[in-house]
Image (cartoon, rainbow, N blue to C red):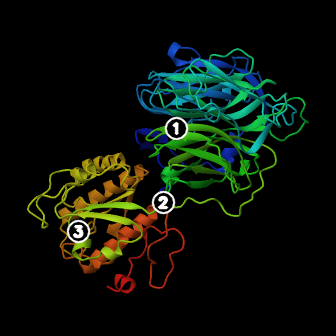
Amino acid sequence: MIKMLVFALLATTGFVFSATSKPSDSAIVSAAGPTSRYEPVQPCRLADERFGVGFIDVTPNTARVSASACDIPLDATAIVISATIVQPQQKGWLVAYPFGAGRPTAATLNWNAGVTRANTATVRIGDDNMIEVYRHNGFGNGGVVIDVVGAFVPTVSATSGRLVVSDTAQRLLDTRNNSGSPLGPDSTVRIPLPDGVPSDAVALAVNLTAVQTLGRGFFTVFPAGSSRPTASVLNADDRGQVRAAATVVPVTPDGFDVYTNTGAHIIVDMTGWFTGESAVESGDGLFVPAVPLRLRDTRYETAPVYPGGTISVPLPVQAARAAGVVISMTMVAPERRGFVTAHAARTPRGTTSSGNGMPFEVTAQFGITAASSTGIEIYSSGGTELTVDLLGWFTGPQVSMSETAPAGNGVPRQRVIALGDSTMAGVDRNRAWAQLRGADFDFRARSCARLVRTSCRGREGPIPPPTALDTLRSLPYGHYDVAVIMSGYNEGASAVAAALPIIVREARAKGIRRIIWMTHAREFGFDKGANIKGKQTYAAHNSFIRSYANDNHDVYAMEWSRIVRQVQFWLYYDGIHLDWYGGHGAADFISRAVAHVTGQSCPMPQVPGGTTDGMCPDPGFMPPVDIARLYGV
């Protein structure tokens, strides 16, 4: 069945995210603050772990930061911060949220070991005028830096400080289109206010992208003509990198400046601007801060965002009429370099990006984007698992939808590696290959094949077959999308418990994103020679398989044991191996399992003459198919 958000902790490529079910509407109401207008704050350092400055009541995993500093208005209800991790020794993540609200299921910043990363966030101010920072791998591992770059103060209407959100992002600068040379080290470029933005605008919402960085360094944005502050919004670790960050930058009539101490090509896109005193007074464009709320997490769904695909992100009822939303998007270990673009749902996607990600990295990206009545959509150029967290929203009229249907996230034809022992080999023995449908299958099942330990000699030849681990290690990276495992019958309970995590880690290391593990037959002990010892062993196997799948988003326990209990004639007397009908039935089951976990329709109807409309249901919880009638075998 589709995995639900019920797990306490999740490990993904070494990164840990908390995960809970979606809050109720009442919880969302209590998490939202009053409407507020933006007020510029000169970028200022609130806390710096490296020098023991600004963090209060530090515990191993949490610390508070006071909002009663850096000229933050006394009545501010939320602040705009830039959070930076400086050269951590271990990979990890953190989240900033109102003190007293409880830690949410969200991420503000993610990093790999040895890299310096920054991301912007809006954070509602909590009890005692504090925000709280939770760091999952503990403080004292590299340095966390918190800079404030703006604030929101409560009001029901305003002239200055209201957001005018752009329907699509507007490109303000791309140095690649000028001389073709990047900015040099220790240089500054000025970005004038674009046409249509009044000279008394107080700030712009921008995306900053650095391309072809010249080395390790940082990037700072600040009002044109003012002194460069001790703060950064973007960091690079080496030459040739692509890095992106979004922020809200205060401006003067001359615009704003971008400083780089390392050098790079610079791209600047605007997603909105904040009004000045010349604007009419209105209640539109005011900000409603909220405790971070996770809206989508594709790791728990049937598919990632595929290359060139788009997912829809509906908004909670309190934000359903928002003109724009503030979000944090996390690209989780994409297989290739690419970008994401957020835009109002069912409207044309612009040509700019909202964030960039690198292979095998986990990158959090702040963003402000327009919304329509059906929410927002997020496009991925290279494909990625994606989390989307809501930080707040802006009041006002929504973008009109010009498209009748959401953009699609088409599933490419899946490449499947199937690994098994003599049980799965029954598909080969019974020549049931025609029932492996809907994907491209590489079927590698051998009798006596084990998971990790050296195997016995099987009927296929005098040499022991390779283990599942050996086979996975021999695969090229990125060659398969799904692995199907029907093995472990030659193992004891403790061996399976030890081997399963090893197999999963190796599959992930080869770029396999979905791992199907078929539960073992004979745990029910029907009259086919199942002695008590065998029944107990396979029951223990299945218990561990189910538990491990429940705790790992990319592992699926498919209930083959439940199916064969209902069609005992699919198995030989030993209650394990496949006879003629079982070979064809297993091939059909595997095909349906692949379709189910990848969000596709079934390759065959459930019954002759039926349809395959909609997503294929979990075959382990459907009636066994009538193989003879469906396939004519």
Q: Give the residue type that dot 3 points to.
A: Ala
Q: Do the residues bearing badges 3 and 1 touch, measured as CB atoms within 8 Å? A: no
Which label was assigned to residue 425? 3
Q: Position of residue 227 (x, y in %)?
A: 70, 14
User: Disc 1 residue type?
Assistant: Thr
Q: Which is more N-terminal, label 2 or label 1?
A: 2
Q: CA distance from mark 3 to mark 2?
A: 28 Å
Of circles 1 and 2, the one toward us is: 1
**Local SS, label 2:** loop
Q: Residue at x 62, y 16 (%)?
A: 230
Q: Earlier in the sequence, mark 3 or mark 2?
A: 2
| Residue 363 numbered mark, or none | 1
Tell me if 205 is positioned left or right of 341 in this view. Answer: right
Secondary structure of residue under mark 1: strand
Residue that label 2 marks: 2
Determine whether 300 is above or below 44 in the image: below
| Res. 128 in view | no
Q: Can you tell which of label 3 and label 2 is closer to the viewer?
A: 3
Precedes in sequence: disc 3 or disc 1: 1
- Residue at (52, 51) in percent of width and height: 298
Which residue is outermost to the front?
A: 179
Looking at the rendered image, the quarter that the C terminus falls into is bottom left
What amino acid does circle 2 point to?
Answer: Ile
Kindly report the distance in space between the C-alpha atoms of the residues bearing marks 3 and 1: 42 Å
Distance from Cα at disc 1 to Cα at disc 2: 26 Å
Find residue 546 and report its horizontal and vertical position in percent.
Answer: 36, 56
Q: Are marks 1 and 2 in contact (CB under 8 Å)?
A: no
Which residue is located at x 37 percent, y 83 percent? 631
Towards the viewer: 154 or 193 = 193
Query: Residue placed at 75% from the left, 43% from the top?
Result: 166
Q: For residue 178, which quarter of the picture?
A: top right
Instruction: Determine if residue 248 is in view.
Output: yes
